[in-house]
Image: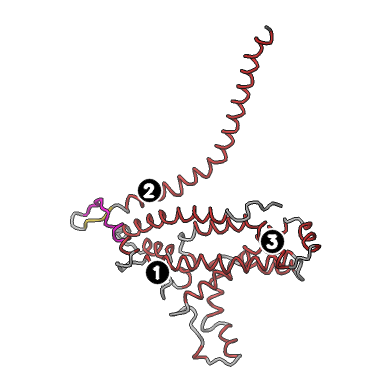
Amino acid sequence: MNNFKEMPKSWAVRFKMKCKKNWRDWIFVLCLTALPVIWFAIFWVYVNFDSILMSFKQFDTVTQTEYFTLANFKEVFLDIAGRSSGMFGETVLNTFLIYATGVFIGMPLCLMIAFFMMKGMPLTNFYKVLFFLPSMISQVAFVYVFTYFIGSNGPLKEIFIHFGGLEDKYPVFLGPGLAMPTILFFGVWSSFGYSTIVYASTMNRIPPELFESAKLDGAGFAAEFFKICLPLVWPTLSTFIVVNLAGSCSGPGVILLMTQGSFHTNTVGYWMYNIVANSGDGSRLYYPAAFGLVISFLLVPLVILVRKVVNSFWQDAEY
C-alpha cells in the first residue's frame, strides 16, 4: 500500500521537474532567437514597411494624391519579360555576374592559396600579412588606389609602354566594353585578403593526423585538397555562398565608386540607390518599390534552394 501511495507523488515530482526543464529550454531558445527576430523586425519590417505600401501606389499629379494600383507590378513583370524599357534585365544580369564570379572564380583561388599556406609554404606568415593588410583600409581608398593604378596616368600604363605598347593603344579599363570585366576582376582581387585568412584558419583546425594518414596511403596534394580539406571546410564555404547570395542585391558597392552605372554596369543595389538619391519629389519611387519587392520574393526562395543544395554536400564529413 505504501508503494501505491508513493507512486502519484513520484510521478508528480518527475512531471514537475520535466516541465521545469522544458521551460528552461524554452527560455534559453527564446533568448537566443530574440536578437535576430528583433533585428529583422527593426531593420527589415519597420524600414521597408512604407516601401511595401508604396509599391501598391501611384501619384496623381492632377489631384496631388496617392492612390492604390497594381500598375507598378505590371510594369515590373513587363520588364522581366523584356517588353519594357526598364532596367530589370541589365541590373539582374550584372548582379548575378558579380556573385557568380566571386563563387566560381574568387572562392576557388582563395581556397588554393589558403591550402598551400596551411601546408607550410615558405614565408606563409608573411603572405598572410600581405594578403590581409589591404583589407584593413576602407573600400573607398581601395577603389581609389585601384582606379589610379589602371588609369591613364597610372603605373600600369607606364608598364604597358615599357614593354612596347603604344600610348594611344592603352585600353580604357573603365570605359565601353571593359568596364564590367574590370569590376569583376576587382571583386575577385579585393576578396583575397579576408577570404583567404578565413579559409586558412578553418583548414588549420583540421587534425594533422588526417594528412599524415593520407600520406601513408600515397595521397598527393590534389587528393588531400579534394578529399580532406574541401569536405571539412565545406560548412564555412556553404555559409559564404548563402550569405553572399542573400546580400547580392543590397548596397551600391563598387559601382558607385567606379562607374556610377555607366557603360552597362548597373546592378540591383546601385540602380535602386541611384533612383532614391535622385528621386527629387519622390514621384519616381513607386516603380523601384515594386521592383525591390519582386526581387525580394524571387531572392528568398532562391536563397532557400541554394542553401538546401549546398548543405546536401558532404553531410557526413567530420573532424
Which mark, by number, is residue 90?
Answer: 1
Residue beneath the point at 40% across and 53% down: 297
Position of 307 relative to 13 (above/below):
below
Question: Label 3 crowding class (10 Å Cα cut-off): few <14, some 14-19, many 20+?
Answer: some
For the residues marked 2 and 1, what is the alpha-carbon distance in whole angstroms?
A: 27 Å
Which mark, by number, is residue 319?
Answer: none
Query: In the rendered structure, are the residues bearing label 2 and label 1 in contact, judged by CB atoms less than 8 Å apart?
Result: no
Find residue 198 and report its image quarter.
bottom right
Which mark, by number, is residue 227?
Answer: 3
* Residue 224 in picture, x, y percent from top left: 72, 64
Amino acid at the residue labelled 1: Glu
Q: Is residue 53 left or right of residue 251?
A: left
Residue 73, magenta (yes or no): yes
Q: How is the image coloured?
A: secondary structure
Residue beneath the point at 50% across and 90% down: 169
What span is in magenta?
64-75
* Residue 249 in picture, x, y percent from top left: 45, 60
Decide which of 215, 205 is in the foreground and name it: 215
Find residue 58 and report its image quarter.
bottom left
Position of 263 relative to 284 (above/below):
below
* Residue 211 in picture, x, y percent from top left: 77, 60
Q: Nearer the viewer, mark 2 or mark 1?
A: 1
Query: In the rendered structure, are the residues bearing label 1 and label 3 in contact, judged by CB atoms less than 8 Å apart?
Result: no
Point out the residue furthest to the left here: 62
Q: Earlier in the sequence, mark 3 or mark 2?
A: 2
